[in-house]
Amino acid sequence: MRFLPLGWFRSLHAKLFTVTALVTSLLTIAVAYSITRNSRREMENYTKNLAYETSLEVKDEILQRWDKDFHDFNNKPAIEELLESLAGPDRSIFQIDVFKRGEGPDGVELVTSSGDDATVSFGKEIGSHMKGNPQAELVNLNTGTKAWKFYLPIPNPKPGKPPLGLIRTYCDLEHWETVWEHNLRNTYWRLPFVLLGEFILLWVVLATVVTEPIRSITAAMARLEQGDPSARTDVRGQDELGIIANRFNLMAAQLERATLERESLIEEIRGLNAGLQSRIETALGALQAKNQELERLMEGNALLREELGQQERLAIAGQLTAAFAHEVGTPLNLVNSHLQLLEGQTDLNDRTRERLAVIHGQIERVGDIVRKMMSVTRRPRIQQEPTPLAPLVADLQQLWSPTLASHGVTFEWSAPEPCVLFVDRKQMEQLFINMVNNSVDAMPDGGHLRLTVEADPSAPRWLISLADTGSGIPAEVLPKVFKPMFTTKPEGKGTGLGLAICREIVRSHGGEIHIHSEVGVGTTMSFPLPAMA
């Protein structure tokens, strides 16, 4: 008997054979296991359906023979004959019991059975199964085998009435278990021979298709390595190994030609190497200097593009604002005219006049906002004046309280007394309204909004922070939120100018806005405002 050398275990043939044999073995075993498992499942399903169909046949026969008052059977011997024809000790359906609602302690009575009525046992579970849906249980018999116990309620033909009774059918799995175990033993007995046949076939195929062509190619490579320029391989084929062999032959022919050319070029290359090295070093130094200069130019170009983008967006914002002011101005004037006519009526009560005054104030405020939006693209000229914070917040709360209530957002604020800002009041209204609107949009399911004011010990100013419990701003979006025309809201929900305007307002008062945000936690906007000296 010839033993293979140990080197074979390191060969490609051995690796392919081992891996392929392992995979095919696992697949074969898995298929055999799946077939036996599915055959058992199909056997159990078949016997279960057999019990169900037998129960349906008995139920249909009983409903035909039940008397008109639904108290007892007509022609009971016919039912017993049916049960005996469907069930027996030597059959899969070895017993069928029929119960009806009765006056016994368990609320059920045995009507008849395919076996001995005296040996039929039942209890309260019959009543529970009578009220439910058809059910099947897989139980163990005293003989050591399993059987299906199937419960099928007998419905009452009268609507709204309780079921008439219950059919309990036993289906023995002993015969089917024997057949399944026989098939399982045959499967396990044949499996080793199947695997052995697969291994032999796999060995022959790999040896013919892989090992022999590789051996021929490696032998030709060895001759070429030893200096034989005429080394060629005789492997022919259209597969990958055939392509490799063809490429090797072409490579060997080209290598033979290249060897002759190489000798003539070696001397020429040696002469060029000395001068080329110095030129390379000089060129590398110049290239490095150019690269550094190019890097500085690219940085400056990036800054210029960013600034140009900002100016373009501001220009677009100015055009949009002008168009908006033109379109809004006419309806505002009409609304204001009708409002003046209403105010001129003498039969208005005080509550109505108060509401008209609020509407008039808001129309004037909208007009101021439109005029201020016209100056978004240029630094606004502010009119600073002493502005107590408490009345400002109270007025703003009247404006945004309906919005907060409709979104389920609560608002609270705290500030030391007295807190007097030296700011442009109109711009402050626009600043806080824009910020609160952004926070409310970030809390569609409700949340909490808190305004906190603290004194800055290092300068005469107040430190303002507005925190919400909204969805937060992703880290990749945070650097872009102040860019004009940038928005993450759906189309029609935002213009991308709100935070840009807020930043310009804070900057015009000598401050800068800082944002801290965590996704899923909330966002806090902090900025300083000048205090009244």
Image (cartoon, rainbow, N blue to C red):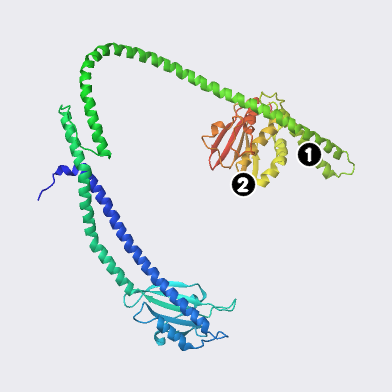
Q: Residue at x 44, y 74 (%)?
A: 53
The residue singled out by tag 2 in the image is: 446
Work out whether 341 lies above or below 195.
Answer: above
Tag 2, which secondary structure?
A: loop
On the image, which quarter does residue 363 sit in? top right
> Residue lying furthest right in this view?
346
What type is the residue that disc 2 sits on? Gly
Q: Residue 116, image x and y in percent?
A: 39, 86
Sequence-first disc among 2 and 1: 1
The residue singled out by tag 1 in the image is: 359
Q: Residue at x 26, y 66 (%)?
A: 185
Q: Which of the pair 511/479 is nearer the observer?
A: 479
Q: Quadrant of the C terminus?
A: top right
Q: Which of the pair 62/142 is nearer the observer?
A: 62
Residue 285 placement, left or right of 263: right
Residue 445 placement, left or right of 128: right
Q: Residue at x 23, y 35 (%)?
A: 245
Residue 513 in view: yes
On the image, which quarter does residue 9 sit in? top left
Q: Residue 526, image x and y in percent?
A: 59, 33
